[in-house]
């Protein structure tokens, strides 16, 4: 089964361990971690496709952006707590977050893995 990792928004692979009325418990194959998720976060396997092979499970996850990927003055975007896209400029680089000024009087402290670089195309 594939399921959504809410921390980074990526789909992960796992096996069903337990099923309840509103939740399913999955065992993630790569990290051996157990997840209890609502059924909406789980994608059932396609009956026409063959089961995942060991080589597909061993593929490393894509690297997440880190502190070194961003600089002060760069234009970035992110989704706020209401899942609304926000665009702004990095005004400060902190240890774990970047301070982003959106230009409307608000500034946000955003973890680096939530930031996306914005490229202006003229």
Image: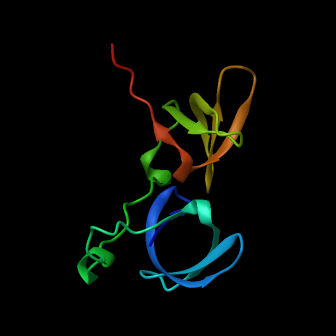
Q: Nearer the viewer, residue 5 or 79?
A: 5
The image position of residue 4, as x and y in percent, is: 52, 62
Q: Nearer the viewer, residue 102 or 4?
A: 4
Location of residue 24 by image quarter: bottom right
In this rendering, position of residue 62 left or right of residue 75:
left
**Quadrant of the snapshot with the N terminus:** bottom left
Relative horizontal placement of residue 71, taking residue 20 as reference (left or right)? left
Q: Residue 106's x, y, as percent?
A: 74, 28
Q: Is residue 80 above or below residue 101?
A: below
Q: Residue visible at 61% across and 31% down?
A: 86
- Residue farthest to the right? 105
Can residue 10 be seen here?
Answer: yes
Residue found 57% across the figure and 38% down from its top? 78
Residue 12 picture location, percent across and down: 45, 68
Q: Residue furthest top?
A: 122
Classify 93 as above or below 59: above
Quadrant the C terminus occupies: top left
Q: Residue at x 71, y 19 (%)?
A: 104
Q: Is residue 95 visible?
A: no
**Up/down of 120 relative to 85, above or below:** above
Report x, y in % for residue 119. 39, 27
């Amino acid at each position: 089964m594939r399921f959504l990792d809410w921390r980074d928004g990526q789909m992960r692979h796992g096996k069903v361990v337990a099923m309840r009325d509103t939740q399913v418990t999955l065992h993630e194959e790569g990290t051996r971690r157990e997840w209890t998720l609502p059924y909406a976060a789980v994608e059932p396997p396609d009956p026409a496709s063959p089961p995942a092979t060991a080589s597909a499970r061993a593929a490393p996850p894509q690297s997440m952006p880190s502190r070194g990927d961003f600089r002060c003055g760069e234009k970035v975007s992110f989704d706020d707590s209401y899942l609304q896209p926000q665009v702004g400029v990095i005004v400060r680089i902190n240890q774990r977050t970047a301070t982003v000024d959106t230009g409307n009087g608000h500034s946000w402290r955003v973890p680096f893995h939530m930031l996306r670089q914005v490229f202006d195309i003229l």
